[in-house]
Amino acid sequence: MKFKAIFLFLALGCLGLTSFLNQAKPPITVYLIGDSTMSVKETKAFPETGWGMPFVYFFDNTVKIENHAKNGRSTRTFLEENLWQPVATHMKAGDYLFIQFGHNDEVPTKKSYTSEAAYQANLERFISEARKKNVTPVLITPAARRKFDAAGKLEETHAVYSGLVRSVAQKQKVALIDLDRKSQELLQKLGPESSKLLFVYLQPGQHPNYPQGKEDDTHFNELGAREMAQIVFAELKAQKLELADRMVKPQVK
């Protein structure tokens, strides 16, 4: 009985310490700005899922995720449509700003097209405004598209604009999560067929939202979004960013 009482005392002490440590960390907000590969989806789009959706479940109750990413947006249109202003206004010291654009900036035929020079300038503006508020900016290269050649080798589709993100990160000394390269590695490992399991690939009649079926090599399903979110979180830990210390701790039984 004596040993049981000691064990119970120590267990309660550990729980109390864990609770105290969580309370000792000030609450912070992680703002996500970007495009459709990150954004929250409407029910009518399911099973399409942005990686920012499962990302919210990785952290303890000291972290709030605000996902401001929007479908079809580039750095330019995000600014022109005043989607940036609410983030710039409300972010505060200690918060994080995750910046992931490129899919829509890089395509000359899209209305969202942004020149290389403007793309870099816009990224630098987000970084500058975050730093003025003592917010930690994190640059993220765009997630890879699923595009294999005849030999089964994944083709790089963001070479120029991902390179610009890396260049800005180096110049501005900002944390960089190279989601493009990491997701390329994952897709290549899975190969041309198995990699479809991460994207919105549906047969006609398989899902009520897409009665005609769908083959989408850009947007993720729930599994793909979770895989991308796990890559981002793994990079946070690898780079020893303080945010990674706020991960959900497994309950000891």
Image (tube, grey):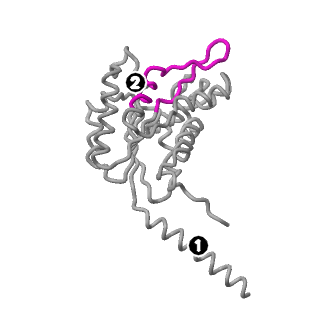
Q: Residues within 10 Å of mark 2 (few under 14, many from 20)?
A: many
Q: Which residue is mark 1?
A: 14
Split into 4 quadrants, where in the image is the C terminus?
Answer: bottom right
> Closest to the observer: 76 or 237?
237
User: Which quadrant would residue 252 be assigned to in this image?
Assistant: bottom right
Q: Position of residue 10 (x, y in %)?
A: 63, 78
Amino acid type at mark 1: Cys
Q: Which type of secondary structure does the marked residue at label 2 adopt?
A: loop
Q: Residue at x 59, y 77 (%)?
A: 12
Q: Secondary structure at mark 1?
A: helix
Specify the segment rendered in magenta. Answer: 141-168
Q: Position of residue 155 (x, y in %)?
A: 57, 18
Query: From what the image shows, is residue 246 above or below residue 23?
Result: above
Q: Is residue 109 above or below residue 47?
A: above
Q: Is residue 197 magenta?
A: no
Point out the frontmost of discs 1 and 2. Answer: 1
Residue 11, quarter of the rendered image: bottom right
- Asked whether 120 or 203 is in front, the reply is 120
The Cα–Cα distance between marks 1 and 2, rounded to whole angstroms, is: 49 Å
Give left or right: position of 146 versus 26: right
Q: Estimate how packed mark 1 is, as few (under 14), some (14 to 19) or many (20 or more) residues with alpha carbons within 10 Å.
A: few
The residue labelled by disc 2 is 104
